[in-house]
Image: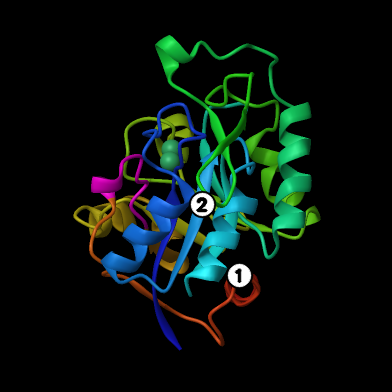
């Protein structure tokens, strides 16, 4: 079945994510925009995934638990998991492998953890946007060991992308996909980095504000509408 997707969305738990990016607001906006399946990918944490997956279930929207991991080289990688349980175990691992530097909400923004009724039930004290200790060389294997899949984020951006940091995108990586935040320069990128021609190109919003969520445009062909089917889809590409 062909499903409209957006696999890169931040909640109010990301310091740079708007406080209005609550589980219910994100699910409501995703439904208005016409999505069938979305992923929550906060920076270096999955702690709002339990709430939003539940809200999605109650509203007929598949929400894939995920994370946008910042590697030790400051490369952003989208990580997706079949279940909340696996995502939360990975989240704990990332927390243990990140610098213990406190967030200053007045400067960087709030890091709210919410329940499925949009109540603030806690916050993350350490700043989530810092580079973790996990290298880009290890990230694929680590995410796979937690049952997930991962691929580099926003390749067309000039910061925090694998190309902007390493200056290359080669074939000796195992990523099943590459993410672009828009397709305007895709052909240019494919010419310059031919390895991209063999990758599934995923286009997601990287929304930090509700108004960044766009009308559904891109589709993915899954055997069923579930997080498990999405993970299997990417695994078959490897
Ligand atoms: Zn990013
Ligand atoms: Zn992002």
Image quadrant in which you'd find residue 233: bottom right
- Residue 168 lies, with reference to residue 236, above or below; the image says above
Residue 69, quarter of picture:
top right
Image point (77%, 37%), residue name: 92
User: Dominant secondary structure of the magenta stretch?
Assistant: loop
Which of 28 and 83 lies nearest the eye of the viewer? 28
Mark closer to the chain start, 2 or 1: 2
- Say whether residue 31 is visible: yes
Magenta includes 25? Answer: no
Instruction: Count neighbours of disc 2 (C-alpha within 10 A) and say few if under 14, some if 14 to 19, many if 20 or more.
Output: many
Query: Residue placed at 39% from the left, 33% from the top?
Result: 19
Question: Residue 227 got which mark?
Answer: 1
Residue 172 visible at all: no
Identify which residue is drawn at 60% across, 70% down.
Answer: 227
Q: Which residue is mark 2?
A: 40
Q: What scheme was used to colour the molecule?
A: rainbow
The Cα atoms of the two marked residues, 2 and 1, are separated by 12 Å
In the drawing, does residue 83 fall left or right of residue 168? Answer: right
Are the residues flagged by discs 2 and 1 in contact, CB closer than 8 Å? no
The answer to which of 78 and 104 lies nearer the viewer is: 104
Q: Is mark 1 within 8 Å of ligand 2?
A: no
Quarter of the image containing the C terminus? bottom right
Q: Position of residue 51 (x, y in %)?
A: 59, 52
Would you place residue 113 above or below residue 218 in this image?
A: above
Q: Which mark is residue 182?
A: none
Identify the residue shown where x is 53% and y is 63%: 63
For the magenta stretch, what is the residue range?
204-212
What x and y, as percent, mark residue 215?
A: 23, 64
């Amino acid at each position: 079945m062909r499903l409209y997707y957006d696999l890169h969305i931040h909640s109010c738990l990301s310091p740079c994510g708007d406080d209005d990016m609550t589980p219910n607001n994100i699910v409501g906006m995703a439904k208005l925009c016409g999505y069938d399946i979305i992923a929550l990918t906060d920076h270096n944490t999955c702690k709002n995934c339990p709430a939003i997956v539940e809200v999605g279930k109650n509203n007929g929207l598949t929400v894939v638990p995920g994370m946008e991991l910042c590697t030790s080289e400051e490369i952003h990688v989208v990580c997706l998991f079949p279940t909340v349980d696996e995502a939360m175990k990975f989240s704990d691992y990332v927390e243990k492998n990140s610098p213990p530097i406190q967030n200053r909400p007045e400067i960087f923004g709030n890091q709210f953890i919410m329940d499925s009724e949009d109540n603030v039930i806690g916050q993350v004290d350490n700043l989530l946007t810092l580079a973790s200790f996990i290298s880009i060389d290890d990230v694929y294997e680590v995410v796979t060991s937690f049952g997930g899949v991962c691929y580099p984020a926003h390749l067309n951006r000039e910061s925090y992308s694998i190309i902007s940091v390493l200056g290359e995108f080669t074939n000796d990586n195992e990523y099943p996909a590459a993410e672009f935040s828009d397709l305007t320069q895709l052909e240019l990128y494919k010419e310059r980095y031919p390895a991209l021609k063999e990758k599934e190109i995923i286009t997601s919003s990287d929304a930090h504000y509700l108004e960044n969520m766009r009308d559904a445009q891109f589709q993915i062909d899954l055997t069923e509408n579930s997080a498990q089917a999405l993970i299997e889809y990417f695994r078959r590409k490897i």
